[in-house]
């Protein structure tokens, strides 16, 4: 049980840092770089800002224990969609293997968080 919680919180912390803290930090401290990644993929600027908000809401849903399981499912689904679509966007637009693999790596970490979150909720 303790090992499961450690795995869950490690994976969830990595996701929270990558999907929420870094985008918000960029938005606050380096606003000129907020649209850097989405602009390269030919998305409009407003998409980057809406993506930051959606990612933060998704991370809040999966991190806070008092959030309902239904909202957590939506949070995991939304974050999964952003990572899958990031992979597809990079595959279609720039074809850079590194940029294509990074979302898949974080998707795998997100899946670990989801799996172990379910496991500790069932056991606990």
Image (cartoon, rainbow, N blue to C red):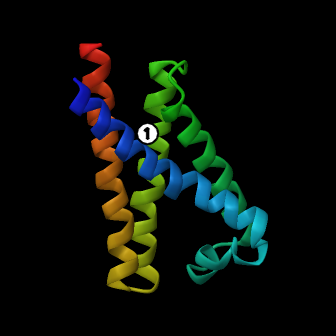
Residue 60 x %, y %: 58, 36
* In the image, residue 112 above or below residue 109: above
Residue at position x 45%, y 46% from top?
Answer: 13
Residue 33 x %, y %: 70, 77
- Number of callouts: 1
Work out whether residue 97 or residue 25 is closer to the camera in this orientation and state it. 25
Residue 22 x %, y %: 59, 61
Q: In which quarter of the image is residue 102?
A: bottom left
For the question of whether residue 28 can be seen, the reply is yes
Residue at position x 32%, y 18% from top?
Answer: 121
Q: In this view, does 1 lie to the left or right of 101?
A: left
Task: Return the residue found at the far front.
Answer: 2
* In the image, residue 47 above or below residue 67: below
For the question of whether residue 91 can be seen, the reply is no
Which quarter of the image is occupied by the C terminus?
top left
Work out whether residue 81 or residue 106 is closer to the camera in this orientation and state it. 106
Which quarter of the image is occupied by the N terminus?
top left
Q: Quadrant of residue 90?
A: bottom left
Q: Is mark 1 on a helix, strand or loop?
A: helix
Work out whether residue 41 or residue 75 is closer to the camera in this orientation and state it. 75
Residue at position x 44%, y 20% from top?
Answer: 69
Residue 91 x %, y %: 37, 78
Residue at position x 61%, y 79% from top?
Answer: 42
Q: Residues within 10 Å of mark 1 (few under 14, many from 20)?
A: some
Report the residue marked by disc 1. Answer: 76
Q: In this view, does 78 lie to the left or right of 6?
A: right
């Amino acid at each position: 049980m303790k090992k499961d919680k450690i795995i869950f919180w490690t994976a969830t912390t990595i996701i929270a840092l990558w999907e929420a803290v870094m985008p918000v930090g960029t938005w606050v401290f380096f606003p000129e770089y907020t649209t850097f990644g989405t602009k390269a993929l030919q998305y409009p600027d407003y998409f980057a800002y809406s993506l930051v908000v959606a990612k933060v809401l998704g991370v809040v849903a999966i991190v806070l224990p008092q959030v309902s399981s239904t909202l957590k499912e939506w949070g995991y689904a939304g974050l999964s969609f952003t990572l899958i679509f990031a992979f597809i966007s990079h595959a279609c637009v720039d074809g850079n293997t590194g940029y294509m693999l990074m979302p898949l790596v974080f998707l795998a970490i997100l899946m670990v968080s989801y799996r172990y979150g379910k496991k500790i909720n069932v056991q606990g």
